[in-house]
């Protein structure tokens, strides 16, 4: 943990937009000293955990928000992406103001 991803790793987040680096417009443009080291979780997942946002897959309904201790729950990445903005300076997702 705390090391850089291997080139082309699909778990690496983009320090400029927060998306998966491999598939974003910045792929191949990020200098090593600006990359985000891997700490065991993607940035959207870390934000969801920090904010207490979890979801569980409900048949016929899809991913549904729930308490963290709900069996089968995982960090709610959809809510993170819908309710947060990427802070390029801090290299993390932050809740939208308002």
Image: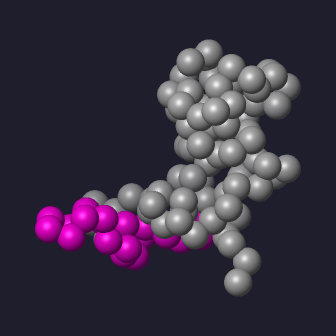
Q: Name the foreground residue: 67 vs 27.
A: 27
Residue 83 screen position, x and y as percent: 58, 69
Q: Is residue 56 left or right of residue 8?
A: left
Tally of numbered discs: 0
Q: Is residue 71 left or right of residue 8?
A: left
Reply above or below: 42 against 70: above
Q: Which quadrant of the figure contains the C terminus?
A: bottom right
Residue 29 location, quadrant = top right
Say whether residue 51 is magenta: yes
Residue most toward the bottom?
A: 98
* Residue at image point 21% right, 70% down: 61
Residue 32 location, quadrant = top right
* Residue at image point 65% right, 46% down: 18
Where are the magenta residues, as a range? 50-68
Q: Name the foreground residue: 42 vs 89.
A: 89
Q: Which quadrant of the figure contains the N terminus?
A: top right
**In this orientation, does residue 62 appear?**
yes
Q: Is residue 78 left or right of residue 60?
A: right
Residue 34 location, quadrant = top right
Reply above or below: 89 against 6: below
Residue most toward the left?
A: 60
Say whether residue 80 is magenta: no
Residue most toward the top?
A: 7
Residue 43 screen position, x and y as percent: 61, 48
Applied colour scheme: one colour
Reply above or below: 32 against 74: above
* Residue at image point 25% right, 65% down: 62
Residue 10 screen position, x and y as percent: 50, 28
Reply above or below: 2 against 9: below
* Residue at image point 45% right, 61% down: 78
Q: Is residue 22 left or right of residue 34?
A: left
**In this orientation, does residue 2 appear?**
no
């Amino acid at each position: 943990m705390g090391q850089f991803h291997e080139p082309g790793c699909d778990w690496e987040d983009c320090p400029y937009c927060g998306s998966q680096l491999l598939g974003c417009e910045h792929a191949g443009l990020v200098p090593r000293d600006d990359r985000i080291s891997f700490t065991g979780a993607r940035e959207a997942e870390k934000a969801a955990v920090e904010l207490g946002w979890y979801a569980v897959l409900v048949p016929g309904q899809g991913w549904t928000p729930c308490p963290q201790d709900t069996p089968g729950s995982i960090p709610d990445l959809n809510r993170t992406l819908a309710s947060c903005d990427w802070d390029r300076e801090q290299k993390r997702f932050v809740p939208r103001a308002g």
